[in-house]
């Protein structure tokens, strides 16, 4: 199983990429988004998918990398 990280995954392009990757069934998709220019409504449809994981935060914040350490 591939583990994939998408920054800005709640935006238009990111959410469509998430949909494509989740359709493949063998991907575990993680997204990081701060929701400044995106909307949670773009990703609500993925919340029940066990292969989808949301990390809310800004990639510019060094503390966000603590959340990424859990992904191995």
Image: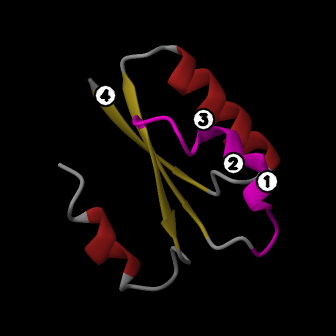
**Residue, disc 1:** 41
Question: In this picture, which residue range is highlighted in magenta?
Answer: 36-51
Q: Does the segment drawn in magenta span residue 37?
A: yes
Q: Residue at x 31, y 70 (%)?
A: 67
Which badge, 3 or 2, is on the more N-terminal residue? Answer: 3
**Residue, disc 3:** 18
Q: Where is residue 48? Give x, y as percent.
A: 53, 39
Q: Residues within 10 Å of mark 1 (few under 14, many from 20)?
A: few
Q: Is residue 36 left or right of residue 71?
A: right
**Of 22 and 61, the residue lying toward us:** 22
Which badge, 4 or 3, is on the more N-terminal residue? Answer: 4
Q: Residue at x 39, y 26 (%)?
A: 27
Q: Does the segment drawn in magenta span residue 11?
A: no
User: Under tag 2, what secondary structure?
Assistant: helix
Disc nearest the viewer among 1 and 3:
1
Q: Residue furthest left?
A: 72
Which badge, 4 or 2, is on the more N-terminal residue? Answer: 4
Could you tell me if the residues under marks 1 and 2 are in contact, i.e. CB atoms within 8 Å?
yes
Disc nearest the viewer among 3 and 2:
2
Q: Where is residue 65? Give x, y as percent.
A: 32, 73
Dividing the picture into quadrants, the one containing residue 40 is bottom right
Q: Residues within 10 Å of mark 3 (few under 14, many from 20)?
A: many
User: Under tag 3, what secondary structure?
Assistant: helix
Q: Residue furthest top?
A: 24
What is the distance, in whole Å, between disc 3 and disc 2 at their CAs?
12 Å
**Residue, disc 4:** 2
Here the colouring is secondary structure
Dividing the picture into quadrants, the one containing residue 69 is bottom left
């Amino acid at each position: 199983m591939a583990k994939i990280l998408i920054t800005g995954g709640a935006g238009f392009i990111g959410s469509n990429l998430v949909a494509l990757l989740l359709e493949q069934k063998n991907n575990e998709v993680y997204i990081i988004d701060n929701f400044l220019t995106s909307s949670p409504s773009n990703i609500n449809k993925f919340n029940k998918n066990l292969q989808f994981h949301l990390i809310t935060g800004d990639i510019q914040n060094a503390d966000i990398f603590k959340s990424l350490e859990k992904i191995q």
